[in-house]
Image (cartoon, rainbow, N blue to C red):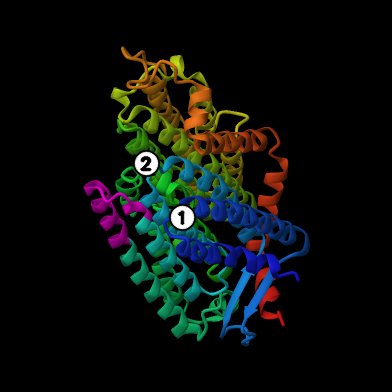
Amino acid sequence: MQNVYLLSVLLIPLLTAITILFLWGKVVAQKIVGAISSILYLFAAIMLFNQALTSGMAIENVGNWPIGFGIVLVVDQLSAIFLMLCAILSVVAFWYGSSFIESKASLSIFLPVYFFLLFGLSGAFMAGDIFNLYVWFEVMLVSSFVLFTIGASRSQLEASLKYVTINVVSSALFLIGIGILYGLTGTLNMAMLGKLLPELQNQTLATVGASFFLISFGIKAAIFPLFFWLPATYHTAPIGFTALVVALLTKVGIYSLIRFFTIIYPLQGTPIQPILLVLAAFTMVVGVFGAAAQTDFRRILSFHIVSQIGYMIMGIAIYTPLAIAGALFFVVHNVLVKTNLFFIAGLVGKLFGTYKLKELGGIMQKLPFVAILFAISAFSLTGIPPLTGFWGKYLLAKGGFETGNTLITIVTAVSLGVSLLTLFSMTKIWNEAFWKPFPNICGDLEPSTNFRSILKAYPGMLVSIFVLTAIILVISFFPNSSIEWCMSAAENIINRDMYINGILQHN
């Protein structure tokens, strides 16, 4: 019975996607099935999360093949945190998208593809071998490409082609890395790779193989200098279609980097560690300067995703339990806050018909509740205490300065400076869109537009924003449990024996 929830997390989105396909054109029925399934998925993820924290790993050896030869699904504390985030976001993104998308034809495409994407995300977080991780990446690539192109505007198609092209390159590099590691060890199981790779005499070739994974996962995570596809893509498609993509796609890259460079190829003391530290610094700086130069609401937020990825990479590269816990907490913070900011941007775009800052204005005067919701997430993104961003940056800074390493200290100092520039760009949005007066306040909005009318017109969008804001505030003012979960997960993945032995000794 212990693997019922593990299998449910994988099968619920798959069966839902297939069911919704059979209900093609019956939008009401599709929405009902989707809503029920997203709640069931959240329940299964909560139970799996509780199991991982209290009882250890959940392992499913598909087909009962000898370990190392068949498909193994694994949920440890690291996987459980990402699956939990996936489940929370799947519910609110479903509400948001169902309310945002008004075309029945678009909804009939969106809903099944949405659950296929969720299926791919779930599989990636549970993959116990690197080839199946590659397969799940391809499921996500196809699903996200469809979501990016619904509507088929010229800008969407151009951006989506860039997205697919760079991800095909990423997949090719992934396969090369797989070939090298298989040639060295004769297995693709992560636990067996973690046991065999350190025993190889030729560590140079192992490092070469690891470099291919660094580049491949770096593309997925959008680290410097491989990030250009993200700000070129995320602002083109309507946020209602791509909410789950925006929330979690780069985090799969972060998850894969953490998993690979702790279990399979421990980063500490390798030539890749200082490289990753330098890349983290450049990712933070280039991302935040890119955001500061933009004049479009969504493009600013897209560049900030890049900048915030740098903090997560920094935590991985520092490679102490505290720093990796900080990176995990920062993932939780960023997924919730950045998604909420995109949700708010989508609502603003829906009401105003534009995302250009110079064409916006007067929101604080006309819709003060929207301004307050934006301010909470914006302040959290910049790290204002006691909001979630502060706790994430505090853990990372403490972990960095405690090492006494010169390079780590410099990169940690850079991260603090980037926070000030993040505040500048958030202030830019606030001044232009929310505070600045506008002759015809809020453009084409009717004078009667208020909280009640917006709730009536777009209930799912508004509820999603309020739910995420509430979660952000709860974690901000009561961070201890979240920090403890992240610390426990970090200690388990750095001390690799629990993961490796748990799988290799599984019957």
Q: Residue drawn 54% across and 60% down?
A: 258
Q: Is residue 268 visible?
A: no
The dot on residue 303 is 2
Tell me the crowding category of disc 2: few under 14, some 14 to 19, or many 20 or more residues within 10 angstroms, Cα based.
many
Magenta segment: 147-166
- Residue 500: horizontal and vertical position, in percent? 65, 73
Q: Earlier in the sequence, mark 1 or mark 2?
A: 1
SS type, badge 1 = loop
Q: Nearer the viewer, mark 1 or mark 2?
A: 1
Q: Residue drawn 42% across and 56% down?
A: 25
Q: Horizontally, is 402 left or right of 415 in the view? A: right
- Residue 167: horizontal and vertical position, in percent? 34, 62
Dots 1 and 2: beta carbons under 8 Å? no
Tell me the crowding category of disc 1: few under 14, some 14 to 19, or many 20 or more residues within 10 angstroms, Cα based.
some
Q: Is residue 335 visible?
A: yes
Where is mark 1, residue-wise?
26
Please tell me how many numbered marks the rendered image carries: 2
Q: Residue drawn 72% across and 58% down?
A: 47
The image quarter containing residue 441 is top left
Q: CA distance from mark 1 to mark 2?
A: 38 Å
Q: Quadrant of the C terminus?
A: bottom right
Depth check: give the residue in front, 282 or 147: 147
Depth check: give the residue in front, 491 or 364: 364
Q: Quadrant of the N terminus?
A: bottom right
- Quick check: 173 above or below 249? below
Which three-letter amino acid code belongs to the residue tagged 2? Phe
